[in-house]
Image: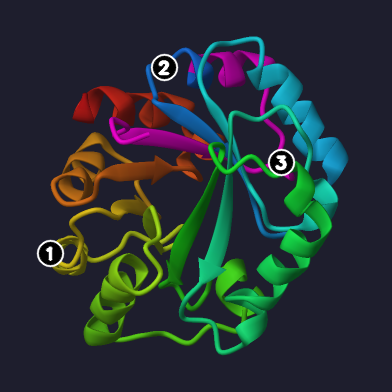
Amino acid sequence: MNEWKHVFKLDPAKEISDENLDMICESGTDAIIVGGTDNVTLDGVLDLLSRIRRHTVPCILEISTMEAITPGFDYYFIPMVMNSTEKKWMMDIQHQAIKEYKDIMNWNEIFVEGYCILNEEAKAFTHTNSYLPDDEDVTAYAYMAEHVFHLPVFYMEYSGKYGDPELVEKVKGQLDETMLFYGGGIESSFQAQEMKEHADVIVVGNIIYTDIKKAIKTVGAIK
C-alpha cells in the first residue's frame, strides 16, 4: 500500500457495465475501493467483488455498514470520521464491530482511516452529522491521526467537489508516517496531477460514471 499512487472507488449502489469495469480494472490503477454511503447492500458488494475478482487488481472494502461485510477482499478500510459531531462515527460503530468480529479479524488486512469530510453538500457529511472544519482544524486532525491515534491513513474526502490544493499541501506537511489520501471532484488529468503533488494517493470516483475515458486518463497522468 505504501507504493500506491492512484485508486479508483466504485459505489456498489451504482450501475457499471462489464466493459467499463474491465477498463477500470485493467487501467493500471493500484487498487479499487468498493464503498459508498447510501443503499450499500451485501448483494451489491458481492456483485462488484465477483466481477473485480476476474482481474488481478487489489480490491478493498471500505466499510460503511456492517450488514455488507463479506470475506474475499484483499483489504478492509474502517473509517473514523474525525469531524463528526457524534462520537458514534468516531468510536461507537467501530466498538460494535470489534465486539462482533474481533475473533475473525486479520489485522494484516485491516486499516483504519482518519476521515475528514470537507463538502457540506455530500451525503456522507450529512449522514455522519459532520461540521465543516477550517484549515487549522483540518491540519490538527491530520496531526492527531498520526501522533495521537497512529493511523495508517488520513483521508481528505471532498465527495464529488474538487478541493483546495493549498490545504492538501498544508495537511501533507503534518504527516510523516500516515499516508494522505485525497478524494473528491477529480475529473481531469490536470486535477489528478495537481492533487498528487501533495497527496500520497488520489482517489477517483464519480467521473467513472459520467466519463469513463477521462477517468482512465487520470491513471496515466500520475504514473
- Image coordinates of residue 125 in percent, x first then y, are 55, 75
Q: Is residue 26 left or right of residue 188?
A: right
Q: Is residue 19 left or right of residue 179?
A: right
- Image coordinates of residue 86 in percent, x first then y, are 62, 87
- Over which residues does the magenta segment extend? 1-23
Q: Which label belongs to residue 12? A: 3
Instruction: Indicate whether 199 appears above or below 213.
Output: below
Q: What residue is pinned by disc 1? A: 173
Mark toward the viewer: 2 or 1: 1
Q: Is residue 159 visible?
A: no
Q: Is residue 172 visible?
A: yes
Amino acid beneath label 3: Pro
Q: What residue is pinned by disc 2? A: 27
Q: In which quadrant of the rendered view does residue 158 lie?
A: bottom left
Instruction: Indicate whether 87 appears above or below 78.
Output: below
Per the image, label 2 sits on a secondary structure element best described as loop
- Image coordinates of residue 1 in percent, x first then y, are 37, 34
Can you say which quadrant of the picture contains the C terminus? top left
Identify the residue at horizontal 66%, vertical 16% (top origin).
53
Identify the residue at horizontal 65%, vertical 52% (top origin).
36
The disc, 2 or 1, on the residue closer to the chain's N-terminal end is 2
Q: In which quadrant of the rendered view does residue 219 lie?
A: top left
Identify the residue at horizontal 14%, vertical 68% (top origin).
170
Per the image, label 3 sits on a secondary structure element best described as loop
CA gap between label 1 and label 3 equals: 34 Å
